[in-house]
């Protein structure tokens, strides 16, 4: 009995310390339709157009996963608006840096372009999922 009691007393501090960590909040994106503008405080982002969508369709074997390139207009209060080109790979592993606005620790990034191509299906209107955060 003493053996079990000493084990319990030994492990209590570890259990209590493990519970002190705060969980990371989930990554939440904002859906932006083509032509739509969204604002993040003094910064606004407008999804202008899809320049290229060569991503390999679902359920098709391709030699190259492909990519999608989109153009956004970034406006910051008191500054001239700039056009940014963003390249999104078929997966996060193949994506280039998708942060198209950074200032100090703050960033705005593109997460994904929807819909993902499907062989034989007509493409629906595109939407761009973007996210803001701090490093």
Image (tube, rainbow, N blue to C red):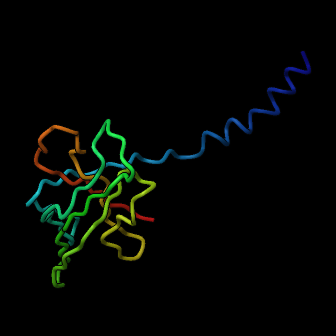
Quadrant of residue 37 within the rendered picture: bottom left
Residue at position x 47%, y 48% in the image: 24
In the rendered image, which quarter contains the N terminus?
top right
* Residue 47 spot, x, y in % from top left: 15, 62
Q: Nearer the viewer, residue 100 or 113?
A: 113
* Residue 127 spot, x, y in % from top left: 17, 51
Residue placed furthest toward the top = 1
Residue at position x 39%, y 50% in the image: 63
In-image side of 49 versus 86 (left or right): left
Residue at position x 69%, y 35% in the image: 15
* Residue 80 spot, x, y in % from top left: 16, 84
* Residue 87 spot, x, y in % from top left: 30, 64
In the rendered image, which quarter contains the C terminus?
bottom left
Q: Nearer the viewer, residue 52 or 103?
A: 52
Q: Nearer the viewer, residue 131 or 119?
A: 119
Image position of 53 with respect to 119: above or below: below
């Amino acid at each position: 009995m003493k053996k079990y009691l000493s084990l319990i007393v030994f492990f209590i501090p570890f259990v209590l310390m493990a519970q002190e960590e705060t969980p990371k909040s989930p990554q939440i994106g904002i859906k932006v339709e083509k032509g739509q503008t969204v604002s993040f405080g003094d910064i606004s982002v407008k999804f202008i157009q899809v320049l290229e969508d060569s991503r390999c369709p679902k359920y098709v074997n391709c030699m190259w996963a492909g990519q999608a390139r989109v153009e956004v207009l970034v406006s910051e209060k008191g500054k001239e608006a700039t056009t940014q080109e963003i390249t999104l790979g078929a997966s996060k592993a193949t994506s280039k840096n998708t942060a198209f606005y950074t200032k100090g620790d703050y960033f705005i990034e593109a997460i994904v372009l929807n819909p993902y191509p499907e062989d034989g299906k007509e493409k629906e209107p595109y939407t761009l999922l973007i996210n803001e955060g701090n490093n």
